[in-house]
Every structure is written in structure tokens, then in C-alpha cells.
Image (cartoon, rainbow, N blue to C red):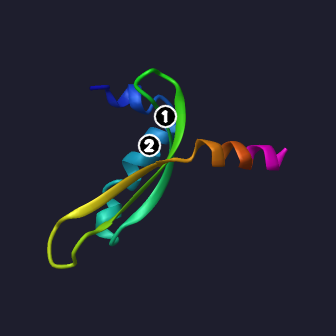
Amino acid sequence: GLSVLQVFPDPVGRSAFAAARPALPLAGGGRVQLQVARADGSMIWIDVSTGPLHAADDDWLWTVSDISELKAQQARAEH
């Protein structure tokens, strides 16, 4: 596998994920958007969402979506 520094080469993204991850389950779920590196080293933007599967147990569903195109469209709209 890749090291944390390889997956999150951007210190801001790494810090954002590290800060958000523990709070997501405690808050009943949530989302965070981060820039991360793929195995080939290319950078992508992801949206990470989490939430409980069942209120009565500790099973959580985590989803990760590639939002690189959305971020590119937003950047183009801002300029």
C-alpha cells in the first residue's frame, strides 16, 4: 500500500482528512472534500462521505467519489 504522505501529498488535504475523520462517526456521519494522489501519483479530488448503516450497531458506510471534474468546472467558473 501507499503511505499517508503518498496518498495525501498536500499537507492541507492530509490535515483536513486527519481532522475530519474522527469527528465524522461521532457526529452521525458527514462529508469532506480532499485532494489525494492515486497509485500512479496523479492528483484527484475526492468527496468522502460516511454515515451509520443501522442506528443500533457500529456498522458504517464510507463512500468515496471522484469529483475532479466538478472541481475543474468550479475553477473555470471562478476565472
Amino acid type at mark 2:
Ser
| Percent of width and height locating residue 76 | 79, 43
Asked if 51 appears above or below 47 in the picture, the reply is below
| Percent of width and height locating residue 71 | 65, 46
Q: Which residues are magenta?
A: 75-79
| Percent of width and height locating residue 5 | 39, 27
Amino acid type at mark 1:
Pro
Residue at the (37%, 55%) spot, across then down: 63
Asked if 52 appears above or below 72 in the picture, the reply is below
Quarter of the N terminus within the rendering: top left
| Percent of width and height locating residue 8 | 43, 33
Q: Distance between the Cα atoms at labels 2 and 1? A: 6 Å
Q: Are marks 2 and 1 in contact (CB under 8 Å)?
A: yes
Q: Which mark is residue 53?
A: none
Asked if 30 appears above or below 40 in the picture, the reply is below
Residue at mark 1: 11
In the rendered image, residue 77 lying in the magenta stretch gets the answer yes
Quarter of the C terminus within the rendering: top right
SS majority, magenta? helix
* 10 Å crowding of disc 2: few (<14), some (14-19), many (20+): few
Residue at the (37%, 46%) spot, across then down: 18
Residue at mark 2: 15
Left or right: residue 27 versus residue 8 is left
> Foreground residue, 35 or 44?
44
Asked if 25 appears above or below 55 in the picture, the reply is above
Q: Residue furthest top?
A: 40
Residue at the (34%, 62%) spot, across then down: 23
Residue 56: which quarter of the image?
bottom left
